[in-house]
Amino acid sequence: MTNNNNNIILTRTVKDDLERLFQFQLDPEAIYLAAFTPKNPHDRAAYIEKYTKFLGDPTIHMQTIHVNDRIVGSIARFYIEEDAEITYWIDRPYWGQGIASSALTCFLKMEPTRPLFGRTAFDNIGSQRVLEKCGFVRTGEDKGFANARQAEIEEFIYRLEE
């Protein structure tokens, strides 16, 4: 799917995309803001193994985000218990350009599952704005252990109904 505002194209994630996507999540500032990350985000083998399994999982809808033929991030719908949740990750050099909002808008056109939930660390203002721009409404709060911060932190829960 294409969004002409930012030359964004979403494609089904394939194994060849994983190495590039792994590199994005090594950025210390991105790890801090994402907060809820693996215990060791530098473990390449664990990352590749985990996401390779996800590629074949029919309950996970993963897309790679491209801008001008360059991989700049990923977006996916997955389930935690019975709740469908959204996750996305944009390479830091592309932050603040509207790419996450545009990619999520495109993704929501191809992903019919509703309600759809999004979660973000209490201080990840950028991600909160992305969800809100795309029609998600903040419906609650939770606390959880954030590996990236080695502490329990508050997270905000968002819901999209339409």
Image: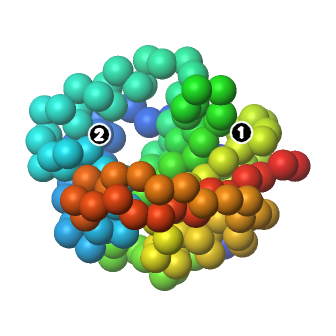
Dot 2, crowdedness within 10 Å: few (<14), some or many (≥20)? some
Measured as percent of width and height from the top left, residue 52 is found at: 31, 25
* Front-lying residue, 63 or 82: 82
Dot 1, crowdedness within 10 Å: few (<14), some or many (≥20)? few
Q: How many marks?
A: 2
Q: Which residue is drawn at 52% across and 78% down?
A: 125
Disc 2, SS: helix
Q: Is residue 121 visible?
A: yes
Q: Residue at x 33, y 31 (%)?
A: 51
Disc 1, SS: loop
Q: Which residue is drawn at 76% across and 63% down?
A: 137
* Number of the label disc, if any, that sits on residue 111: 1
Q: Which amino acid does label 1 sit on?
A: Glu
Q: What residue type is labelled 2?
A: Leu
Measured as percent of width and height from the top left, residue 148 is found at: 25, 59
Does residue 92 appear left or right of residue 11 in this picture? left
Does residue 18 appear left or right of residue 82 in this picture? left
Task: Give the CA separation, mark 2 to mark 1.
Answer: 21 Å
* Front-lying residue, 41 or 108: 41
Measured as percent of width and height from the top left, residue 110 is found at: 72, 41
* Front-lying residue, 66 or 145: 145
Tell which residue pokes out farthest to the right in this image.
162
* Number of the label disc, if any, that sits on residue 18: 2
Measured as percent of width and height from the top left, residue 99 is found at: 54, 69
